[in-house]
Image: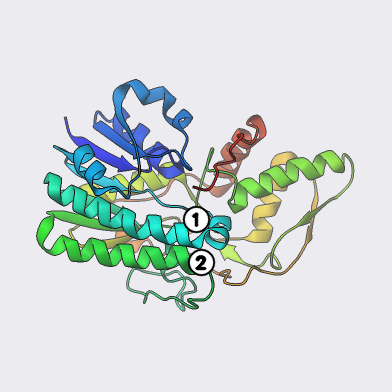
Amino acid sequence: MKKAVVTGGGGFIGSYLVRRLVECGWNVVVVDNLARGRVERLQSVMDQLDWQQGDVRDPALMKTASMDADVIFHLAAVNGTENFYKQPELVLDVGLRGALAAMEGGRDAGVPDIVIASSAEVYQTPDKVPTDETVALTLPDSLNPRYSYGGSKIVSELIAFNYAREHYRKVQVFRPHNVYGPDMGWKHVLPQFIVRAKELIAQHPVGTVPFPIQGDGRETRAFCYVDDVVDGILTMYQHGSHREVYHIGNQEMVSIADLVHLVADYFERDFELVTGELAIGGTRVRCPDISKMAALGYQPSVALAEGVRRTADWYVRNSRPPRDNALL
């Protein structure tokens, strides 16, 4: 039986990955301090895994948790755009020291492989769309706290690939692009749209529902359903190469206006967009080139309309948790 360590396993993507690994027969160790993750996400498999509650920034913990492991999946981070603006010091601290602790703890425990989660934020506003893995990494403005996350991921990639030269058999970095799905938290665009729609419909039981957004609605994204992302991570690990970066996402582009209309269709109401200012540092267009992953056999399968339906079903059924996936 293979053994995997998943940092941030109580988080959104991490919990989906943990459940998949358990289902596939892996022995799984989860490292999470529950500052943003929730143990409830893993209730269905809790009796089948080793739960190590603690701070990923602790190299001693990471060494202990990683003994006899085949691979570390390092996903722990302070994510969420709202957090980038409000807690940039913490975003940087967890991003940098967490990556160092994961690499050093794994090295000291003799783990052969490590997979590091990066982000599309490392290149922020690319000149080329769809964007492949060779695009230059950029930090547009060091004064803008929004780039605390992208900056921490750039450094994480440097840490990963330079430690990889001598200490690991396989080191891979994946950049997920606009991952969504049930129980993804409350500080991302799709759950915010769903919750906003539910509240506004209650205020406007008949007629057209005015729906405020940032920007003019022409901003575009390529959203990828979380199960497809987990497929991509495991495909990459199985078939991908050492010291390589892979974009994991979907090339089905959609404007923010059309995303709102998909939410409106779910609720079977008409929405009228009320446009506003785009947040400073916001990106107008983002879409990954997934050719490199496709060559490994990866192909996302959940269409956006279906994914929005599944996600909205969850958010309509579930109330906001008391901690609201609180900041650390």
What residue appears at the point 34 percent right and 60 percent down from the top-left corner? 96
Q: Where 160 falls versus 268 (above or below)?
A: below
Residue 247 visible in the displayed image? no
What residue appears at the point 54 percent right and 56 percent down from the top-left corner? 83
Q: Could you classify mark 2 by the number of other residues whose Cα lies within 10 Å: few (under 14), some (14-19), or many (20 or more)?
A: many
For disc 1, the marked residue is 178
Q: Is 157 on the left-hand or right-hand side of 68?
A: right
Quadrant containing the N terminus in the rendered view: top left
Q: Is 182 on the left-hand or right-hand side of 128?
A: right
- Cβ–Cβ under 8 Å for marks 2 and 1: yes
Q: Is 185 on the left-hand or right-hand side of 175?
A: right
Q: Where 261 falls versus 166 (above or below)?
A: above
The residue lying toward the viewer, choosing from 260 and 141, is: 141
Amino acid on which disc 1 is placed: Asn
The residue lying toward the viewer, choosing from 96 and 163, is: 96
What is the CA distance from the residue labelled 2 to the residue labelled 1? 9 Å
Residue 74 visible in the displayed image? yes
Closer to the chain start, of discs 2 and 1, is 1
Label 2 residue SS? loop
Q: Is 239 on the left-hand or right-hand side of 30?
A: left
Give residue 266's position: percent from left, percent from top.
69, 41
Tell me the number on the disc at residue 286: 2
The residue lying toward the viewer, choosing from 84 and 295, is: 84
Amino acid on which disc 2 is placed: Arg
